[in-house]
Image (cartoon, rainbow, N blue to C red):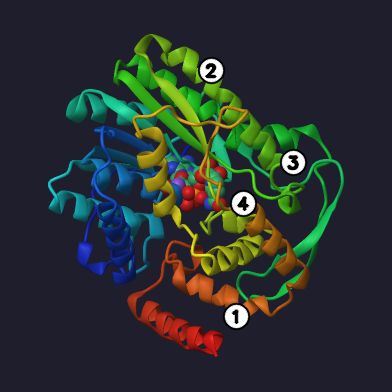
Amino acid sequence: MIIKPRTRGFICLTSHPEGTLQNIKNQIDYVKSKGKIKNGPKKVLVIGASTGFGIASRITAAFGSDAATIGVFFEKPAAEGKPGTAGWYNSAAFEKEAHASGLYAKSINGDAFSDEIKKQTIDLIKKDLGQIDLVVYSLASPRRTHPKTGVNYASVLKPIGQPFTNKTVDFHTGVVSDITINPVDNDEDIQNTIAVMGGEDWKFWMEDLKEAGVLAEGVKTVAYSYIGPELTYPIYRNGTIGKAKDDLEATVTTINKLLKDLNGISYVSVNKALVTQSSSAIPVVPLYISLLYKVMKQKGIHEGCIEQMQRLFAESLYSGEKISLDEKGRIRIDDLEMREDVQKEVAALWEQATTQVKKYWQIQLLHHKEDIAFKSISKSKWEDQKLAGDTLKSVQRT
Ligand code: NAI
Ligand code: NA
């Protein structure tokens, strides 16, 4: 199966749900409020640029550092009365705001795993920017068609070795129950997951960009990883997805060799757990995230994607100082999530978690506009939900 690349411009700006535009504006305002990032990136490619950490990276580069940005993503525009996907509206809103501020911003909508989209992106860089100085790799996908062999890979989210039983929340109903996830019974599922979410495609991008001569001297590239607490190890870090993250992290060495003669460098940043389309698909993890949010908010240290990315750029990638890395060479902006007091309180809440969490979880959904509850939401529905959210909030306070 080859996915047809689509590169149409954004049409009909007036039909965007207002909530999406407001969400993008809020992220822009946040980045502006933190001041300019000194010596920040100037010409940036973001792969996986439409939602989650990707759109936040793009906003940080553009509004924190006046960067020209090219975003690559895979989203559906509105068609025949059907609303488009959240990432489509995000990107339209971003471009609108970027252009209004006199910033270059263009997007390519199509399969980033394909050679065709890589080529289109390179052509656009050559035509408009010449060379780029930062490549953000923020793809998250359940499947990948290999560009050289045509093989379709599907990732699986499973433990390895033993079955894993723990609590999970049904994201639609808010009901908490036990779930048992059987482990993979063959190595193929592990290899397939690595093929989708491991480092090969990041490497392919960097190889193609380098060969085309579009990487600037001193280029940086960063991809995102996750570790999380022991309670999710069986399903995340020690599971199939964790093997893919191991592979992604190991790719840093390969890319560093590739970029050596350009004095370029690659990083993996370990980010905080956040509600996005991809994290919501993992069993057990969403319940952990809802408890984590609760604890971090109480402590006044909650961060969303934009706070994380602004901190990554300003205090790490472009701090002008030596970047501090963990023993495995990774940037750690999951430091607040992993703090001992935070994890202790989450673990205590985990023990107590029942459907009581339901109310809290629903509020989270209503207040985190990036999450999947807001996918394809119409304006009136949005307002209904916002009202419901305010009601729930007052219930929670009493
Ligand atoms: P997301 O689902 O919000 O964003 C994924 C992006 O990839 C979107 O822009 C989507 O359009 C794009 N995409 C997917 N398939 C594509 C394809 N075939 N071609 C072109 N674009 C495609 O994901 P999120 O959560 O922002 O994840 C980004 C990275 O951050 C992933 O590597 C993830 O593992 C990592 N991460 C996520 C955490 C979380 O809790 N959400 C925590 C730490 C790291
Ligand atoms: Na992303």
Mark 3 crowdedness (10 Å alpha carbons): few <14, some 14-19, many ≥20:
some
Quadrant the C terminus occupies: bottom right
Q: What kind of element bears circle 1?
A: helix
Give the residue at x 45% y 57%.
304
Q: Which residue is mark 3?
A: 238
Residue closer to the observer: 306 or 18: 306
Residue that label 4 marks: 339
Is residue 313 visible from the viewing direction of this image? yes
CA–CA distance in space, label 3 to label 1: 31 Å
Element type at mark 3: loop
Query: Pointer 4 and pointer 3: residues touching (CB < 8 Å)?
Result: no
In this view, 24 is above or below 216 = below
Foreground pick, 329 / 66: 329
Instruction: Please tell me whether mark 4 or mark 2 is closer to you in this view.
Output: 4
Query: Callout 4: 10 Å neighbours few (<14), some, many (20+)?
Result: few
Does the closest atom of ligand 1 sit within 8 Å of the Cβ of label 2? no
Q: Quadrant of residue 293?
A: bottom right
List the residue tagged with mark 1: 359
Image coordinates for residue 306, horizontal then vertical, percent:
39, 53
Categorize mark 1 by other alpha carbons within 10 Å: few (<14), some (14-19), many (20+).
Answer: some
What residue is at 33 percent from the left and 57 percent from the top?
A: 90
